[in-house]
Amino acid sequence: MIRPILATTALGLVLSGCTTTGGTAMDDNAMETSNATEKVTIPKATGVFAQPSSLPFHAPDFSKIKDSDYLPAIKQAMAIHRAEVDAITHNPAAPTFDNTIVALEKSGRMLNRVLAPFYGVIGANTNDTLDAVDAEISPELAAHSDAIMLDPDLFARVKAVYDNRAAMSMTPEDSALLEKTYEDMVHAGALLSPAQKQAVKELNSRLSTLTTQFSQRLTEATTDGALVVSDKAKLAGLSDGDIAAAAKAAEKRGMAGKYVLPLQNTTQQPQLADLTDRATREALFDASWTRTEKGDANDTRGLIKEIAELRAQKAALFGKPDWASYVMYDRMAKDPETAMNFMEQMVPALAASQRAEAAELNAAIKADGKNFTVKPWDWNFYSEKVRKAKYDLDENATKPYFEIKSVLENGVFYAANQLYGLTFKQRTDIPTYHPDVWTYTVYDKDGSELGLFYFDPYQRDSKRGGAWMSNFVDQSFLFGDKPVIYNVLNIPKAPDGEPQLVSFDNVETMFHEFGHALHGFFAHQKYPSLSGTAVARDFVEFPSQINEMWASNPKVLAHYAKHYQTGETIPTELIDKIKEAAKFNQGYALGETMEAAMLDMKWHSLSADQAASVNVDAFEKQALGSLGLETALVPPRYRSSYFRHIFTNGYAAGYYSYLWTEMLAKDGSKWFRDNGGLSRKNGDHFRQTVLSKGGTQDYLPMYRAFTGHDPQVEPMLESRGLTGENTAQ
C-alpha cells in the first residue's frame, strides 16, 4: 500500500507525510509583502531545517538531524507558514491566480521540509521521543491547518479568483490547482457559519489526538502481542531459518532460550501456513486477533468509538448523513452507494467460493486423520496442503529463487528498464535513518537524473506494520525539485550470514510498492499539490497494482528468479505452477479484503446518533454478520481494533479502493497483454496517459486515454476465478 495522505492542500501544508514537498536553494523567507497595507514580518528560519538540504536532490540529511530537532522546528515552521499566509491575505492588490493561489502553493516550504522526514521516521524507525513529539504536535498541526483553511479573509480571496475563472487565461494545470484549492477549503468548512467552524476546529483537534493515540497503541500492541514459545517442538513445520529468527527475536527481548513470533499487521500470520502444532496455530491466531482488545493500556476500542462518533458529528455539520458521504467528495467512485454496489455484486459468488473451499479443507483435514472442522487458524495450513496436492507447489521450494536484492535489481528495476528505459545506481553517500535502508539514483531513459530512491525492506519493532511508499521530496517545476521517494516493507530479516530469501507474496509486494514509486518518479507537474501520487484514494492504488503483473512475466522472472546457490533460472514448470495456483483459495484471499472494505464502510455509514450509542464489539459482530459472507471461517484482513488504514492512515471509507483499483489494474493489465505486453512502446503509453498526469485530470477520462474504454470488471473476476454470471444479483 501507499503511505496514506490526510491532506496535502494547495497551501503546501503536509499533515501526514505521504505526499510532501521538498526544498530548493531559494530563500524560504522571500515572500512578497511590499504591497501589504500592514507589513507582515516573516520570522527568520533557524536550525537544521532552515534551508533545503545540501545533499543531492535535497534529500533529508539524517546525519545532521537529531530527534530533539523536530519539535522546535515544526513549531517554528508553523509560525513561518502562518506569517506567509498572512502576507497573502494582507495584500491590498486585487486577488489574482498568481498573488493568491500560486502564493499559497509557495507557502509552508519549511514545514514540509520538517514533516517529510519526521513522518517517514515515525513510521519506519520510531522511538519514545518521536512518539511524544507526534502526540504533542498532532493537535497543533490540526489547529494550524484549520486556522488557514477556515480563514475567512483568505477564502474571500480564493473565492474571488475562483468566481472569475471563466474570464481568466489558465493552463489546464492552473485550472486544476484552482479547483482543488477552492474545493479543499469548502470541504474543510470555509462556507460554514462561525459557530460551525469553531465546532469543526474542536472536532479536528480531538480527532488528531485520538488517531495519533490509536496508531501508537497499535504499534505497541503489535510488538507486545508477539507469541512467545518456550518449547521448540511447538514450532514444528517452520524452517530452520524461521526458527533461528524466532530465537534471535527472543534474545533481543531478553528471553534467551525461548522463541518469539512477531506479529504482522494483518489478521492472518505467515507462520500459520507451516506450523503443524494446532495449539500453536490457535495461540498465534489468538495473539493476532486480540492484540488490541486485552483491556490494557493498548486497548483501542474506546478510541474507535470516539473516532467514529466525532467523524459522524463532523459530517453532520456539513449536512452529510455520515462520514462516508462527506469524505468521498473527490473520489473516482463519488459516493458510498457506488462503492458498496460494486462490492456487493461479488458477494454471492464469493460466499459460494468460501463454502466450497471450506468443504475442500474439511476433506483434507479428515484425510489427515483429524477429527475437527476447519477454523481460521487452520485455514492457511490446510489450504497450503491442498495447494501442494492440486498444483504440486511448495512455496518453500520457490523461495531459493527469490533472493531479495536480485528481486529488486534484476526484477523490479529490470521491468522498469524494459518498460520505461530507467536505469539505477546504488549509492552509499546518502545518510539514511536506519542502516538497513538502501539508496539508488534513478536515471531516465535519456540518461538524466530522474530522482532518488530509498528501499527499507526489513521488519523491526520500531516500524509500523504493512508496506508503503512516500516522498521526502515531491517533483515540482515550480521549485525545480526532483522526487526523493522511499518504499518501506516488513519482510522478516534472515539471521546474519544467511541468504535473504522471500516468498512470492513478498515479491509481488515489492513490485506493488515500486509501482507507487514510478507514479511519483514520473510526476510532471508544476505544482507539488498535484504532483505524482496526489490523486484520489480510489485511483492511487491503480499504478501500483498494475505493476504487480510484471512479477510473473516470463521475461522478467527469467531475469531475476535465479537460485541463490546454483544460479539456475527458475524452472518453467515452477512458473506454470505459480500461475495455475494464483486462482486457488480466492474465496479466502478476496474474502478477507472484501470483508475489511465492507466493515470500513459500515463504520463510516453511521449517523451521529447511531455512532453515539455504538458498542464496538456488538457493532463489529453485527456488521460482519450482515455481509452475507462466511466471516466466522474467513475473518476480515483487519479487525476494527487494529484497522490502522481507517482509524489513522486516511483510508476511512476508502479501503474499498484496493478492490476498485484492482478492477482498473486487471483491466489495464489486459490492455498490456492485448497490445504485446512488456515493451517500451506500451510503457511509454502508460507513462504518458497515467503515470505522468498526477492529479491534473479527472480519472475516468485519464483511464479512457490509457485503454480506450471505460473500466471493465470482467478481467478482475476472471483473475479471481469468478465469472460475471456468478456475480449477477
Image (cartoon, helix red, strand yellow):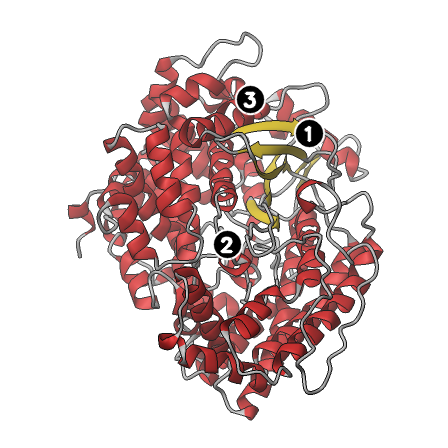
Q: Is residue 697 visible?
A: yes
Kindly report the distance in space between the C-alpha atoms of the residues bearing marks 1 and 3: 17 Å
Point 49% across, 37% down: residue: 509
Amino acid type at circle 2 is: Ser
Disc 2 crowd, CA 10 A, few/some/many (<14, 14-19, 20+): many
Q: Is residue 526 left or right of residue 108?
A: left
Circle 2 residue: 531
Q: Is residue 462 left or right of residue 14?
A: right
Q: Is residue 643 visible?
A: no
Residue 578, by quadrant, is: top left
Mark closer to the chain start, 3 or 2? 3
Q: Which one is nearer the viewer's eye here, 630 or 442?
A: 442
Circle 3 residue: 406
Figure label count: 3
Q: Position of residue 520 (x, y in %)?
A: 51, 46
Q: Is residue 580 left or right of residue 183?
A: left
Tell me if residue 617 comes above or below residue 417 in the rendering.
below
Q: Are marks 1 and 3 in contact (CB under 8 Å)?
A: no
Q: Are marks 2 and 1 in contact (CB under 8 Å)?
A: no
**Disc marking residue 261:** none
Q: Which one is nearer the viewer's eye here, 631 or 697?
A: 697
Tell me if residue 637 comes above or below residue 101 in the rendering.
above
The kind of secondary structure element at disc 3 is: helix
Q: Position of residue 266 (x, y in %)?
A: 53, 47
Kindly report the distance in space between the C-alpha atoms of the residues bearing marks 3 and 2: 30 Å
The kind of secondary structure element at disc 2 is: loop
Point 28% across, 48% down: residue: 705
**Disc marking residue 427:** 1
